[in-house]
Each structure stands twice: as C-alpha cells, then as structure tokens.
Image: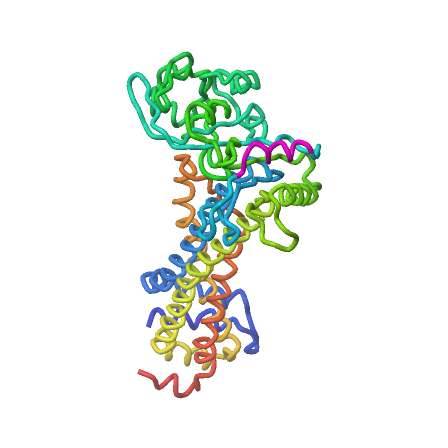
Amino acid sequence: MTELRRTIQPVATEKGGGLNLGETLRVSLDSLAANRVRSFLTMLGVIIGVASVVSLMTLGNGASNAITNQVASIGTNSLTIFATSPASRGPGGGGAAITPLDMSNVATIESLRLPIVGPVPQFTSSSTVIAPAANTTANVVGTTATFQEVQSIVMEVGTFISDDHVRSVAQVVVLGAELKQDLFGDGVAIGETVRIAGKPLRVIGVMELKGGGGFGSLDDQAYVPISLAQQRLFSARTANGQLRVNTITVSVLDAKNIDFVQERIEMALRDQRNIAPGAQADFSVINQAAFLSTLTQITGLLTTFLAAIAGISLLVGGIGIMNIMLVSVTERTREIGLRRAVGAQSRDILLQFMIEATVLSLFGGIIGVLVGSILPIVLTAMGTLDAPITPDSVIISLTVAIATGLFFGIWPARRAANLNPIEALRHE
C-alpha cells in the first residue's frame, strides 16, 4: 500500500490530466529503485552485450592496426617480384616447372633506369646457425647493401652488409634481433664467429627489432652478402649457369609512379623471359600498396563481423528487457489502474514505461562500456596489443543499447497504456 501511495502522490500534481514530464520521470525512477534486483537482472543482458561489442571492436581494431602497420613498415611503395609456375599465380604453387629468377633479371631491371631504389635481389635458404654456446635453424638471406634502405632497417649495433662485402664475397653476417637473442642471449655478438653451412662467418651487426615483413619476420633471419650465399654457402646455379635469386624487391621513389614502374618491369621481364603476348607470365609482381589496401579491407570486415556477433548479445539483452517489462506490467496492473483513476492519460503510462526501458538500457550500456574497456586497457598496459578505446565503439554501443531498449520497450509500454482502468483496478 505504501508503494501505491508513492505512485499516486505525484500523479495528483498532473494538472487537467496533462503530461508532466518531470513527475513521470520521477515515478519511473522510483519504480526502478523499488525493484533493484529486477532492474539489475534486466540490465545484465545489455551490460554483457555492450561489453562484448566494445571489447571485440577495440581488440579487432587493435589487431587490424598491428597487422597493417607491420606490412606498412616495409613501405607501401615496394614491389616484390618472384617466380611462379605459368599455371599458378602464387609462390610454390603447382603446375609446370618453375623457371627461377636470376641475376640477369636483376640486371634487366637495373638497365631500365626507373625512379626506384634497387633492385634488391635476395637468395634465401634454410640452414643451421651455430654459435659458440648455442645453435638454431634459421633462414639465411643473401642480399645487397640496398636491402637496408628498402626494408627501412635500423641497426641496434654494428653495420649492415656493404657493397664491398658483396664484391669481395666477404664471410660476414648480420643477425636479426630475435636470432641474436637465441644464439647469444644478452651477451655481445659483434666480432663473434658463427658457422653457417660449415663456413665461419664474423658477426658485423645486429638489427633492431623490426617485426613482420612482406614474407615473414625479419628478426629471426641471418643476412649475408648475396655473392657469399650464392657462391660458397649454397648451390645457386641454374641450368644455364646463372646465379639464382628467390625474390627481387624495388622501392619506388614516388608512390604515384608505382603502377607505371610495375608495368615497365613486367614488360621488360616478359620480353627477357620470352613470354608471348597474352600468355600467362612465369613470374608475379606484388604491389605492396594494393596488398595493404586488400589487407585493410579484410581486417575491417573481420572487425565488423566480430562486432556483429557481439551485437547478438545486445539483441538477447533487448529481449530480456521486453520479457521483464511484460512481467512488470502484469505485476503493476493495479498500480496502473490507480494512476488512470486519478487522472493519468494513456500517454503518461506509455511515457513512464518507455522511460524505464531507456534508463535500463542507458545505465546498462554505461556499465557495459566500463566492463568492456577492462581487457583492452590491460592488454595495452602489458604491451601485448595496442588497443585503445575508440570513441566510435563507445558511441555505437551506447546508441544501439538505447535503441534496443526503446524498440523492445514499446510493446510492454503500449500494453500498459491500453489497459482498461476499471479492469486494472479489479486486478488482484
């Protein structure tokens, strides 16, 4: 009876049965406060839904940025050429035998005198790298001095391979940051000797931690002069006596010219490798900018997909609001009848229940944002993933939460507003 008096009192201030927004709002909040457990359980679905959306969108954006930054770290104006089978457009694909690239192809690209840095040939083979106190298996990359510029490599200590090293077939090696750690730990590597393919090589440099490159991480590899890799460490001769390379990389000075440069290189190589017009080439050219654009689209779709999955939780939360409010209408039938008897209009009842649904959704959304922010903040603080909370994830989550509450609150509100006052007063 005390609760009914509390409900009737503000209604008596409604003049002429008109709409009094302030009093209706107070009645709605009093009703929610009087049933705290039920209100919290109603909000729980919204809290879980919003927390899931915020958390997954933030982590998805963070992962997407990490991937694209790694790819972009080697430059979006890079072109990478590698041999393929005419029946396959990817490295290592099936089909006819692959005709490898060789140093004559590198010379052909150099002769074009394009506005590029490079070309940078690379010959890669896997080998055991043996240090005085440890050994491991790693990719050994034979390359030239220009590799450092094209890949934007920064040395932690020492120097990178020079043109003199390549000309003199010097037995020197540069270690990636992770490979150095595996072989020497926290000790000094410069000046030490490691053995690769049975040959002693002097360590002249250690790279700073770089991260992923176009074809994997640069940090767990060893780098030697390409002449050393081709002539002394590994077998790199082709059937016609040329020195084989795995890939050729060029960096275009102006990104606006990348399509022009790619076209010129493709035409020159097709001509040199005797590929008839219209026939499928036995090599591919990867445009790093196009690759990055495609990757960005894929990661964006993945983030949207994760948010959509999390949005299902919001849908479930909205259904929970509707169910609880329908039960609430049944429980408060007599209260609604009393309000109507003392002058409240249908629109007042409708507004009251809509306010209750909106308040539940809003507060559930705010709590959900706070809960959903915990994991990204922890991961960012730990340095595991840079995943800052973005305003769009918060705004989208709160907007959807409020919209969900309004949408699923309409039916219970209309049902309450359309109750017959006399029948409502008779309800037990």
> Residue at coordinates 38% horizontally, 23% vertically from top-left?
180
Is 297 or 91 nearer to us in this picture? 91
Q: Quadrant of the C terminus?
A: bottom left
> What quarter of the picture does the N terminus occupy?
bottom left
Asked if residue 105 is among those painted magenta in the image, a careful observer would answer yes
Residue 394 visible within the image: no
* Camera-nearest residue between 386 and 418: 386
| Furthest residue in direction front, as rendered | 240
| Rendered view: 406 above or below 178 | below
From what the image shows, is residue 85 above or below residue 11?
above
Quarter residue 264 falls in: top right
Residue at (46% x, 16% y) in the render: 204
Name the chief secondary structure element in magenta: helix
- x, y percent for residue 187: 35, 16
Range drawn in magenta: 101-111
Residue sitting at 57 percent across and 19 percent down?
163
Tell me which residue sits at (50%, 52%) in the image. 88
* Residue 325 in sight in this render: yes
Horizontal and vertical percent position of residue 242 = 53, 32
Where, by quadrant of the figure, is residue 164 drawn? Answer: top right
* Location of residue 60 with respect to 105 vertically, above or below: below
Tell whether position 326 is magenta.
no
Locate residue 302, reporting x and y percent: 47, 54
Q: Tell whether 168 sits left or right of 32.
A: right
Q: Residue furthest left?
A: 133
The location of residue 71, given as percent across then percent down, is: 52, 40
Chosen colour scheme: rainbow
Give the number of marks. Answer: 0
251 vs 50, nearest the viewer: 251
